[in-house]
Image: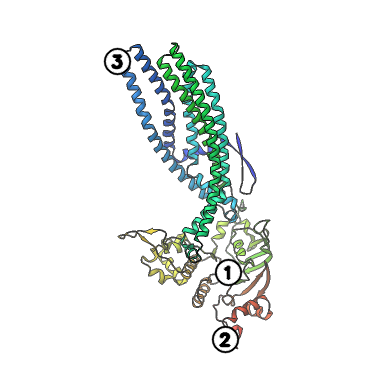
């Protein structure tokens, strides 16, 4: 049996059901082998308990009618009581085993899922809505879908054991009714499988609506958005959007539920008619002496047992089938492979000595998007400071993404001392970089951890952390926090310092967070290339000057790339490159570009106007050098 599914790019693929089942069982066996064996044995044992109970009840009734001895009846009664004890205890034990299996398998699957996600070296999949929908379903699947498959398979076996026992008993009493009961179960099975397919498809279809609902939910409940939500009075608007998305997904779920109710009601009516007819026949047979009272009891139990087993069989097949369909999302993520081509035999990456070259680089995010870079050729010499300037949308941050190899050029190449970045190990390459991104992260961790994330080798090296913080001008602020560098920089979690009760953390200002991001970059000492994307955008003029002086000292003779809208910060760079509409419009020193009287001179003059007093030359604009 096979099923088709869609990849994030829409390509149809076929997965074998047997492979899915094997994967689910192997995950359970890997995560909790002992628990799985106990769960299997208990499930199989409980499958025969209803049949044993019905047979013992028949024997007791028949022996009572026949006047059997007290000892015989007592022995049968004790056996029936023992079966009852096991029947009563089995669900609780099974529930515990299932919960433990869920916990262990969920932990293993979560580890494998995010190991796979961490293996995506680029960013394209994180900007793909189809992939994000699949990732969300994969995260839900990791919560227990393999166990749904295991439980479903065991439920099938248990139902089959019960069914076999009752069918054997029913065949002795009435072969015709046995056939009718079994045939009536076929529509149930078909309907449940069809409904499981529809439900799995519905979950995929409503994925975008559920993600948008979560987006609005986060806006309404997050600290980052709380100020604007209240100031602009947009809470009602966002709540309306959130509820609209919720109604959309609820409507899809409701449609499937209604279809399921209609199907099950009709099939339940069919089962009731067959059961009623069988009961009428059994009463008539008992009156004519063809059946004993025990036979009637067994017949009633057998009909109910067969119908119940068939219904359980159909439900377990449907549940297992739906779980296997959802498991495809998990498998699609964990088996997706690299998102960027990786060299089979990576070339060694020597320390940078010549420089980095962008050779006729073109880039766009997809065929449906416009070109961001259009034939950029640029050389960044080793040991020199190059500044990149331009208006918003010129392609500056995209160029940074390419240099970090979050994407590969659509055309052209980026070379490190003549070696194409696609030919080297991406992890080894990134260890050569120190980067501060324009959209740097705020981590809800301690101050020490926020810095140490730049180089985890320094996580417990207080001296290195302090040196990086001092260079970024944030040490005194961190040292004055309630618990120094161990203070939690968040108000969404509690911290429990020794001897104190639960406390919330503290928050830094925007400029202080930016200094913390710079400290992360300073921690990465000895890197060949330092990239700074608007490193002082949130700082005042004095802080900007201080930071750029620190950057100059930290960079030393290493290669540097600075991106800034504040042209005063780049005027002393060895070379300034002006990017416009994805092309290099101008390049040269500050003085040369000013003499050229082109785009750079125009932008510099516009910015300098705000600083000048009447009669003061443009070149006198205060600023921080970076060279």
Q: Find residue 559 and name its label.
A: 1
Q: Is 302 in front, or is 287?
A: 287
Indicate whether 328 appears above or below 491: above
The Cα atoms of the two marked residues, 2 and 1, are separated by 36 Å
For disc 3, the marked residue is: 70
Specify whether residue 470 is in view.
yes
**Mark 2 touching mark 1, by CB under 8 A?**
no
The Cα atoms of the two marked residues, 2 and 3, are separated by 117 Å
At 57% across and 38% down in the image, what residue appears?
A: 197
Give neighbour class at mark 2: few <14, some 14-19, many 20+ (Cα, 10 Å).
few
Label 1 sits on a secondary structure element that is strand
Q: Is 551 in front, or is 393?
A: 393
Label 2 sits on a secondary structure element that is loop
The Cα atoms of the two marked residues, 3 and 1, are separated by 98 Å
Q: Give the mark nearer the N terminus: 2 vs 3.
A: 3
Badge nearest the viewer, 3 or 1: 3
For disc 2, the marked residue is: 613
Badge nearest the viewer, 2 or 3: 3
At 48% across and 48% down in the image, what residue appears?
A: 111
> Where is residue 378, by image quadrant?
bottom right
Label 3 sits on a secondary structure element that is helix
Residue 448, percent across and down?
42, 63
Where, quadrant-wise, is the C terminus in this rendering?
A: bottom right
Indicate whether 412 appears above or below 33: below
Residue 289, percent across and down?
43, 11
Q: Find residue 461 and name its label.
A: none
How many discs mark residues in the rendered view?
3
């Amino acid at each position: 049996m096979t099923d088709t599914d869609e990849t994030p790019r829409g390509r149809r693929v076929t997965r074998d059901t047997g492979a899915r089942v094997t994967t689910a069982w192997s995950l359970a066996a890997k995560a909790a082998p002992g628990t799985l064996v106990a769960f299997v044995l208990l499930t199989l044992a409980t499958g025969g308990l209803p049949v044993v109970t019905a047979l013992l009840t028949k024997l007791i009734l028949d022996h009572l009618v026949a006047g059997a001895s007290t000892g015989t009846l007592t022995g049968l009664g004790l056996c029936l009581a023992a079966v009852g004890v096991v029947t009563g205890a089995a669900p609780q034990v099974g529930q515990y085993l299932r919960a433990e299996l869920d916990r262990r398998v969920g932990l293993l699957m979560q580890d494998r899922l995010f190991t796979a996600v961490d293996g995506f070296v680029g960013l394209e999949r994180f900007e793909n809505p189809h992939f994000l929908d699949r990732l969300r379903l994969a995260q839900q699947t990791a919560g227990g879908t393999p166990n749904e498959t295991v439980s479903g398979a065991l439920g099938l076996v248990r139902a089959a054991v019960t069914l076999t026992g009752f069918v054997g008993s029913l065949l002795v009493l009435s072969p015709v009714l046995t056939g009718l009961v079994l045939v009536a179960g076929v529509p149930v099975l078909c309907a449940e499988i069809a409904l499981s397919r529809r439900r799995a498809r519905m979950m995929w279809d409503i994925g975008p609506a559920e993600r948008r609902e979560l987006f609005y939910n986060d806006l309404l409940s997050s600290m980052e958005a709380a100020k604007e939500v209240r100031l602009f009075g947009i809470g009602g608007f966002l709540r309306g959007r959130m509820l609209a998305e919720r109604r959309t997904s609820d409507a899809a779920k409701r449609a499937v539920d209604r279809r399921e109710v209609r199907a099950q009601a009709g099939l339940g009516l069919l089962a009731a008619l067959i059961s009623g007819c069988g009961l009428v026949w059994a009463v008539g047979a008992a009156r004519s002496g063809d059946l004993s009272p025990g036979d009637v009891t067994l017949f009633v139990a057998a009909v109910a047992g067969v119908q119940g087993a068939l219904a359980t069989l159909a439900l377990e097949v449907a549940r297992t089938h739906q779980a296997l369909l959802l498991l495809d999302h998990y498998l699609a993520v964990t088996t997706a492979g690299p998102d960027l081509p990786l060299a089979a035999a990576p070339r060694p990456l020597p320390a940078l000595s010549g420089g980095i070259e962008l050779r006729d680089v073109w880039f766009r995010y997809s065929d449906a998007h416009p070109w961001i870079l259009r034939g950029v050729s640029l050389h960044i010499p080793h040991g020199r400071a190059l500044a990149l300037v331009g208006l918003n949308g010129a392609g500056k941050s995209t160029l940074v993404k390419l240099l970090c190899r979050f994407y590969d050029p659509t055309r052209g190449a980026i070379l490190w001392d003549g070696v194409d970045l696609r030919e080297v190990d991406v992890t080894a390459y990134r260890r050569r970089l120190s980067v501060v991104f324009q959209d740097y992260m705020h981590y809800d961790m301690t101050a020490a951890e926020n810095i140490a994330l730049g180089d985890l080798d320094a996580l417990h090296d207080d001296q290195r952390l302090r040196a990086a913080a001092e260079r970024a001008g944030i040490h005194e602020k961190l040292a004055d926090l309630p618990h120094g560098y161990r203070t939690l920089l968040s108000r969404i979690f509690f911290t429990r310092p020794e001897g104190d009760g639960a406390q919330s953390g503290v928050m830094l200002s925007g400029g202080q967070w930016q200094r913390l991001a710079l400290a992360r970059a300073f921690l990465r000492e000895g890197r060949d290339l330092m990239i700074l994307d608007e490193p002082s955008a949130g700082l005042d003029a004095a802080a900007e000057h201080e930071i750029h002086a620190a950057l100059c000292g930290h960079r030393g003779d290493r290669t540097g790339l600075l991106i800034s809208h504040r042209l005063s910060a780049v005027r002393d760079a060895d070379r300034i490159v002006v990017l416009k509409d994805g092309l290099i419009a101008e390049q040269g020193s500050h003085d040369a570009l000013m003499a050229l009287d082109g785009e750079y001179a125009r932008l510099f003059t516009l910015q300098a106007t705000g600083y000048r007093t009447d009669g003061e030359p443009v070149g006198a604009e205060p600023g921080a050098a970076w060279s």
